[in-house]
Image: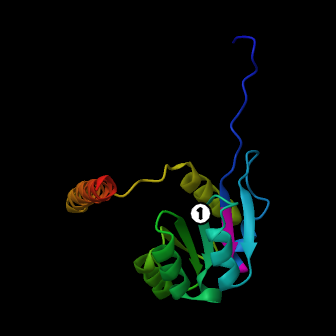
Amino acid sequence: MGMYPQLEPEWVDEVLLAGPAALSISGKFPARTPKLVSASAIEPTFDAAASRRTDVRVIVVDVDAFGVSLIRDLHTVFPSMKIVALTSGPKQMIASLKAGAAIALPRSTPASVLTRLVTRLLAKPVKAKPVNPLALAYLNRLSDFLFIAVRAAMNRKSDSLLR
């Protein structure tokens, strides 16, 4: 294999655990574990998800503790993050999926199953959303206009200096 040792990339993905039911998976990950960050309320959940020092890719939310509105708000603000909803009722599961959760599970889900699910979600690459072609055309035309406007302003300024 050559003279340089093979270094494994550092595991920097983080999983945000929001609520008491989500804490059941602490310490259940295999050898290469993601960093687990827990949040006890709604504001710390948003703070941890938005922090530039972290790379949160999966959020496990206790819907019975925080409500479906937290899932909707998290999905709106962080659309690329995968949200796992834990709840005790089937109506809450359906509402969580409609609000933007990637998957909704009963609170009684064993920690080993939840851990495997989170590991699989971390392994999936984040998909970039396609950009509207009309928006691209608009931005292209806008950049052309700004370029011409700056050139015209520069020409007017240089003409006034020559007089």
Q: In front: 96, or 71?
A: 71
Query: Which quarter shows the N terminus?
Result: top right
Q: Is residue 74 above or below residue 159?
A: below
Q: Residue at x 61, y 76 (%)?
A: 61
137 with respect to 28 (left or right):
left
Magenta-highlighted residues: 15-20
Which percent across, then down, holds residue 105? 55, 73
Which percent across, then down, holds residue 141? 21, 57
Tell me the kind of residue under disc 1: Val
Residue 90 in view:
yes
Q: Quadrant of residue 22?
A: bottom right
Q: In front: 35, or 89?
A: 35
Which percent across, then down, holds residue 29? 73, 54
Q: Residue at x 50, y 74 (%)?
A: 77
Magenta span: chief secondary structure: strand
Is residue 7 shown in magenta?
no
Q: Is residue 106 above or below residue 130?
A: below
Is residue 17 shown in magenta?
yes
Which percent across, then down, holds residue 70? 55, 83
Q: Residue furthest front?
A: 163
90 with respect to 39 (left or right):
left
Residue 107 in view:
no
Q: Residue furthest top?
A: 2
Q: Is residue 39 above or below residue 91?
A: above
Query: Which quarter shows the C terminus?
Result: bottom left
**Which residue position is annotated with label 1?**
58
Label 1 sits on a secondary structure element that is strand
